Amino acid sequence: MTPSTEVGRPRDYRRIACEEGFATAELLAANARLGDIGVPLLTLDGPAKHLARALLDTDARLAAMDRDGVDMQLLMVSAPGVQVFPPAEASALARSINDEVSDLCRRMPDRFAALAAVAPHDPRAAAAEIERAVTRLGLRGAVVNSHTDGVYLDDEASFPLLEALEALRVPLYIHPRDAPAPMRPFFQGPAVAGASWEYAVEVGTHLLRMIGAGVFDRFPRLTVVVGHMGEGLPFWLPRIDNRYQASVHGARTAELLPSEYLRRQVFVTTSGMNYEAPLRLTLDVLGRDRVLYASDYPFEEQGPAVEAVERMSLEAGERRAIFETNAVRVFGL
Ligand code: MN
């Protein structure tokens, strides 16, 4: 790797990274107790124990942030979070995770902010926990690690959670996880599984299902954030709009075109996608007010991600918007 020259350059904006993973020791122990349920779970003695350790280690995290020139991380519980546990246990784990992460944010408010963990399959409790986490713990919204047992947030049973977010004017982050069980056989192999392709298809599908079900008509002030440059959706938008408008696959169900909801209610983060062409496309398609920087720590390397975005030829104002001001506005930092 070439030596870093941009990371330490003097600058007049903060770098805020908006999709940064963490876990608690309690959650990792609970994962270990679940055993093999056909879903990849991080544990302290599993094959990815270095990642599990990195999720817990605040000192290492701060050292990496100082080294890589990241001023602040927005923390969210790593996939699949609490969503693989039975509803009551998932809700109890979420509360405990939120207590723990809010302590860290209170101790270092200029380094850390966080989103609330919630159990979407326990919707009333999830709504109550969002309220508690935002109004009493100071968390900045909520994260769901996409589907819960194959159920997406276009399911009316989940609406109490969306109502709570909209009422509090805080965003929902839809973070990737492995595909639901019926889809899993199709997402096998080194070019397809996980972050190669599976995650993008899974989260893109989640968001389009919400759009197609009219969720954004029902909740016109809800905001949703997705990572990885919009999980491919900015690239596909003209084709999605075109088929939707022509009702090729069924009558239109939402008032606006899919692209209009994206430009009205959706924000995207870079999350370790260190490529100028898709960033340029996303800025052009969604606008500079809708793109936020993320490192995806500790799953992607943070220093090269900062370096890559700093080296891209962005217009005046775009760099500050991506690194700082959009995050400040969207997450109330
Ligand atoms: Mn991530």
Image (spheres, rainbow, N blue to C red):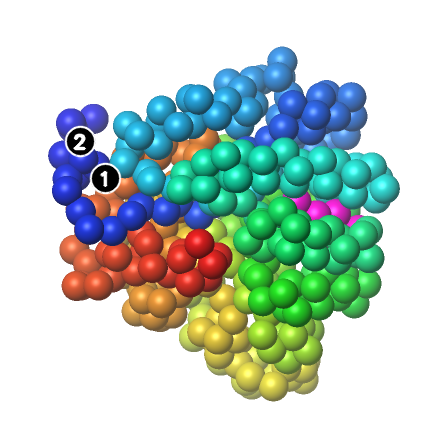
**Above or below: residue 184 compared with residue 50:** below
The answer to whether mark 2 and mark 1 are in CB contact below 8 A is: yes
The residue wearing badge 1 is 307
Q: Secondary structure at mark 1?
A: helix
Where residue 154 appears, x then y in whole percent?
Answer: 71, 65
- Residue drawn at 39 percent across, 28 percent down: 62
Q: For this rendering, which residue is in front, 242 or 303?
A: 303
Dot 1, crowdedness within 10 Å: few (<14), some or many (≥20)?
A: some
- Residue drawn at 35 percent across, 32 percent down: 65
Q: Secondary structure at mark 2?
A: loop
For the C terminus, the image quarter is bottom left
Where residue 305 appears, x then y in whole percent?
Answer: 31, 40
Where residue 71 appears, x then y in whole percent?
Answer: 33, 40
Amino acid under disc 2: Ser
In magenta, the rendered stretch is 117-121
Does 2 sit left or right of 281 as displayed? left
For the N terminus, the image quarter is top left
Tell me which secondary structure the magenta stretch mostly adopts.
Answer: loop
Where residue 103 appears, x then y in whole percent?
Answer: 58, 35
Q: Tell me the quarter of the picture where residue 41 sits.
A: top right
The answer to whether any part of residue 26 appears in the image is yes
The residue wearing badge 2 is 4
- Residue drawn at 51 percent across, 51 percent down: 200
Q: Earlier in the sequence, mark 2 or mark 1?
A: 2
Does 302 sit left or right of 176 as displayed? left
